[in-house]
Image (cartoon, rainbow, N blue to C red):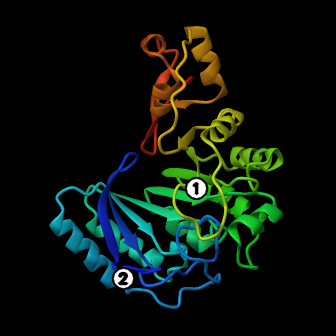
Amino acid sequence: MPYSNSLTFGPIPSRRFGISLGIDLSPATKQCNFDCLYCELEAAATVTTMETFPKVSEVVRAVQDAFAKHEKIDVLTITANGEPTLYPHLDRLVDELDKIKGNAKTLILSNGANIYDKSIQQTLTKIDTVKLSLDCVSLSCFKKLDRIDSTIDVEQIVEGMIEFRALHKKAFVLEVLFVKTLNDKPKEIELLYEAIKKINPDRVDIGTIDRPPAYKVKPVTYETLSSIANSFEGINVNIAYKNRPKAVQNFDEDEIISLLQRRPLTLEDIDNLFTQKSQISLQSLVNSGKVKLVDSSGVKFYKIL
């Protein structure tokens, strides 16, 4: 597929983070230690290091140019055609971005493969929001779905995420992308849930394939995602799904409390599940202090405190 060779892209509006300017640390080619079945880039051999990459000064200059052209940028999103933590000068880049970002926040989107590395952990603690992927916990599923480099150990990744959570005092989000017949099986979901409880992120975003993938794999349904979210009891789960179906119902206050005791619900959940009457009942619970609306890295949840 063609690549843009541009170090920045956007800015584009993000429902979670505001106006986002993307930073691409591998603009000319895909360089990744995963070759995920669902990747929107082309299939490619895995790598453990970046062979071609921009200078820190080049990236900083591109970001400064974007700031000069655009009045409002809320977040600098560090990413790559591949894996951004493979960029050899990431620590210095983060420091330089901090000097020029002003009121903007920093965000990194990573597959999490290098999170066990102490130096990577320390670098990522400097970033305002860290979003890591974890699609499977069993080795067989992990190898099949994410098509990992042979040096990668999923148990090491989970332990690294647990360690990082203890270090990182800012926002930490996990992302799980579900693929039909692979990680949507009950055992895989159970293993993920147990790992997520130990990792203790601020939020978990779950979704499925919504762009043409590198390989012939299929998405799960919204109903599957909703069922998985409900099984992740006590976790802030955000379902990312385009054109989700509405299934509004009436809930009284006791039923609303029961729902929220199982898992917090997002504003989008409420819009898709609650009738107007139920939303009035929910607001009554908020007014009485029994329920609170909280922000988790740009996503608002109703939850019982």
The amino acid sitting under disc 2 is: Asn
Mark 1 packing: few (<14 Cα in 10 Å), some, or many (20+)?
A: many
Looking at the image, is mark 1 or mark 2 earlier in the sequence? 2
Q: Secondary structure at mark 2?
A: loop
Looking at the image, residue 110 lies above or below residue 33: above
Between 248 and 292, the residue placed more toward the observer is 248
The amino acid sitting under disc 1 is: Ile
Instruction: Kindly check if marks 1 and 2 are in contact, taking CB atoms under 8 A apart as contact.
Output: no
Q: Quadrant of residue 261?
A: top right
Disc ID at residue 209: 1
Question: Which residue appears farthest toward the bottom when viewing the image?
Answer: 51
The residue that mark 2 highlights is: 5
Label 1, label 2: how far apart the Cα atoms are:
25 Å
Q: Secondary structure at mark 1?
A: loop
Q: Residue at x 76, y 46 (%)?
A: 189
Please indicate, yes or no, whether residue 156 appears anywhere in the rendered image: no
